[in-house]
Image: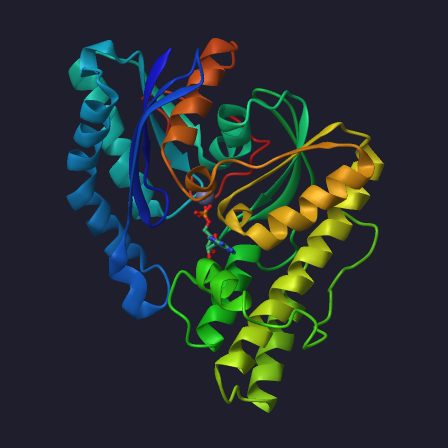
Amino acid sequence: MIVLGIETSCDETAAAVVNCSTRQILSNVILTQAEHIDYGGVVPEIASRAHYEALAPIAQQALSESGKSLQEIDLIAATTGPGLVGALLVGSSYGKSLALGAHKPFAAVHHLEGHALSPHLTEGIDLPYLLLLVSGGHCQFVMVHGIGHYEELGATRDDAIGECFDKVAKLLDLPYPGGPHVEKTAQTGDPNAIAFPRPLDDKSLDFSFAGLKTAVRNHVVKNPPQNEQDIANVCASFQHTVATLLSRKVANALAQTGVKNFVIAGGVAANQAIRHALQQTCNQHGVTFAAPALKLCTDNAAMIAYAAGMRALNDQPNGDITTAIRPRWPLQEQR
Ligand code: KG4
Ligand code: ZN
């Protein structure tokens, strides 16, 4: 099952070829749109135009790097939601056209199913597993019972965690996207310099980050950073608070579910401090921990190809050429 995947739900234009039967990534091309940097966030209209310009050459590059011709591809898959309307339209229309022209089947893929299965692709961890999905748009616990069988156990009641990293970066005049810059700046900071609150630090599996975001803003307004050390201390303390909160939530979730395998996925899973904290929590509970390779944490098309291929291999029908885009689409509501 060789799948060409296309991902354009936000600000990464990506295409990849994956052999899903052997879990081999044959190519994985990702362009992170630089057009948004000056705006400090993703501008939807600019994202659509940039996808439109970049996608065809990127898909061709993914094919040529994979060593496969279009005729050797079994399935063409594209993200159809959730995500930005225009961005989803560009990628899915391109995928559908390519599939029609090449007489290949088309698969409509849920972006979060891609993230959810990325540790299965790169780390070979067994199903079922408990997933903590942490990205720019999401923060949720999902029980991955099997391919196509997902149960949400808890989610954020307000902001996504990546969004929180991005806002903190913006407050400190760090470049967009903020997560990697906050992490890098935190390396020279004191994680215990500032005691930020840990909202919703209880036994529930829900999250809340709005209060933490406000607390960081209030701190920065009252104590404007005077030098690089002050900025590093805010980053380190914020990151430490998030890592502690996530560890405590994961400990709750492991105790409540009794699962033996845990995975973290999504853009924020690239954060080493968070990975390290959650790895320790899993060790304490005797649970296997896995996180995708760094390049597979943030948005990519290999995970989209894999999700489509795994559904096809496991008799879980994919959405097809008649499937519409769905900008809002809960993971459990598959087709
Ligand atoms: O999964 P993703 O690429 O896109 C969405 O589907 O949202 O996640 C992007 C998010 C951004 O908010 C970005 O700041 C965050 O992931 N992120 C990080 C790191 N790398 C990316 N957050 C914290 N630490 C990182 N190293
Ligand atoms: Zn994503």
Quadrant for the N terminus, please. Answer: top left
Q: Position of residue 247 (x, y in %)?
A: 73, 50
Residue 270 falls left or right of residue 304:
right
Q: Residue at x 17, y 35 (%)?
A: 56
Residue 80 falls left or right of residue 195:
left
Q: Position of residue 28 (x, y in %)?
A: 32, 32
Asked if residue 206 shows in the view, the reply is: no
Q: Position of residue 54 (x, y in %)?
A: 18, 43
| Closer to us: 32 or 202 | 32
Residue 240 falls left or right of residue 116:
right
Q: Quadrant of residue 164?
A: bottom right
Q: Looking at the image, is 98 positioned above or below residue 330? A: above
Q: Residue at x 19, y 16 (%)?
A: 70
Q: Residue at x 58, y 75 (%)?
A: 234
Query: What colour-coding does the image apply?
Result: rainbow
- Where's ligand 2: which quadrant? top left
| Closer to us: 162 or 65 | 65
| Total numbered labels placed on residues in the image | 0
Asked if residue 274 shows in the view, the reply is: yes
| Closer to us: 270 or 255 | 270
Q: Looking at the image, is 269 positioned above or below residue 118? A: below
Q: Residue at x 37, y 26 (%)?
A: 323
Q: Position of residue 187 (x, y in %)?
A: 54, 65
Residue 47 falls left or right of residue 208:
left
Q: Quadrant of residue 142?
A: top right
